[in-house]
Image (cartoon, rainbow, N blue to C red):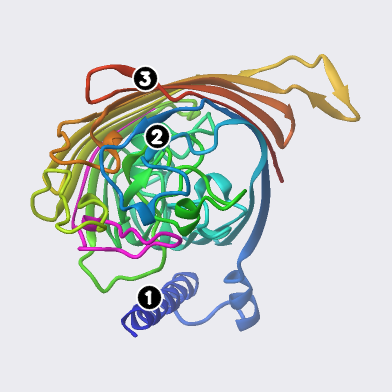
Amino acid sequence: MPLLRSRQGCCVLVLLAAGLWSSVARAEQDPAGEGAEPREETSGLRPRLEFGLEAKANFRHSEENRFPVSFQFPANELPPGQTQVFEETVSAGSHFELSDVTLLVDAIWGDGLAAHGKVDFIDLYDRNPVSTDKKVDIDEAWIRFGVEPEPAALPSRGGVYLKVGKFPKFERQDDRHLESYGLVSTAFNRFEDAGAEMGINLGRHLYVKLSATQGNPVFIRDPNALAGDNGTPERQTQRPNTAFQSGVVILYDAEIEDVDVDGELEKGAGIGYRVADAAGRNALDVMAWGYQRKLAQTVKLEGTFYGGDIDILNGPELVPPRPIPLPIKGDDKQEVGANVWLYLGGLTLFGQYVDQDLAGLPRTGIEAEVSWQFDLPLIWAVGDRQLFTSIAPAVRYSKLDNDFRNIAPTSAPSLAWDWEKIDAGFRLGVFSGVDLTVEYADNRFILGNGSKRNNNELLATLRWKV
């Protein structure tokens, strides 16, 4: 019932806001209450609908790795024939996969009212937090009142926008040039949140962003393409062709499962400054931001009997007395960070720094991606379409420093390791609407004994979109 009431409340707020916006729009068009006929007035409020479809097919080769776990699971919790548990590559070897089919819907009413929906089918690489999660997922569903400029884009004037629904965090990099994610984007802002966001343009250059959202639950995930299986019945029984391995995991903000705003909301704020030339090809945007919320004692997640937030930090609740492997203190979760977007013609640079305190567990992350897109000359054509239209080499560096160590036997020793990842590749425009991205992840980490290991991955993605 509380969840139902929260959903009904969100619907009422959206409908009320839409009604108020429509009234304001009519008043601006006809301030005297006269003029346009009713038929013309309603046609001006009719939305322009735009649809998009995107599909991704992949070749993936993942190195095989396994690392022993010091935590002693009960015999009935171990896979058949095993006496010890390992953190190991989710799905090692070479695989051809259809990872995603995405439907996009946009509705636009004039210059100041828009709605957006994004639905993923299959969703192999974004199943959250385990492989048995939903295969159909509503990634985004929001309505926005007012104009929201893209990063490093100058608005024509100052103003305010309000966005309500499920949407990406405002500090996230949404123009990635590789299909993979870095360590920082995986850990802190890969998945969408639900709530409300307000942006205030103080003129054309200075801006402020404020948000109040549900907050993404904390869980564990392998930073390569696939999320592993942790706390799933399939993982314990090792049923043929159903279970992935655990993965070599980090703490990350998982996707929200359902809309639930009954608890304490996560509060966020950012302030930024942007400049750009008249054509918009050369631009710079810098932003400082922060978030704060209270962690829940547990959050139920799809497909796993492990709980999120404090529950996952406390370790498996299997053997009394329950060991607390991580030195957690309290239930505060807060992070501060800074972003930079730089565009110089075909060159793009994105950088992000994050400093987080997760229930007394301090960690910092840095990530930077640079790419340069070149248009290719017309050499070959198929029909009336150019073959090989552009190429964009890209390199991303990311690092995650965990300033804490395990204090008891743990089921996931990698949570306390320091990580470093270099993703390098290129995106080749094959035809208009078809591109191929080939990349290699050099994913390295420092074990508790000081030795260095790798868990690398090759990924090729053929994307088709209309």
> As rendered, which of 295 and 211 lies closer to the eye?
295
Residue 453: mark: 3
Residue at figure coordinates x 25%, y 34% from the top left? 338
Disc 2 versus disc 3: distance between alpha carbons? 38 Å
- The reply to whether discs 3 and 1 touch (Cβ–Cβ < 8 Å) is no
Residue at figure coordinates x 55%, y 20% from the top left? 425
Q: Which numbered disc, 2 or 3, marks the residue that appears first in the sequence?
A: 2
Q: Tell me the quadrant of the picture where the N terminus can be found.
A: bottom left
Tell me where residue 239 appears, x and y as whole percent.
56, 53
Which residue is identified by label 2? Answer: 152
Residue at figure coordinates x 74%, y 14% from the top left? 377
Residue at figure coordinates x 69%, y 26% from the top left? 429
Is 68 above or below relative to 444? below
Amino acid type of the residue tagged 1 in the rendering? Cys
Amino acid type of the residue tagged 3 in the rendering? Arg
Tell me where residue 361 appears, x and y as whole percent.
15, 41
Please tell me whether mark 2 or mark 1 is closer to you in this view: 1
- The reply to whether discs 2 and 1 touch (Cβ–Cβ < 8 Å) is no
Disc 2 versus disc 1: distance between alpha carbons? 31 Å
User: For mark 1, does the 10 Å Cα neighbourhood hold few (<14), some (14 to 19), or many (20 or more) residues?
Assistant: some
The region drawn magenta spans 284-311
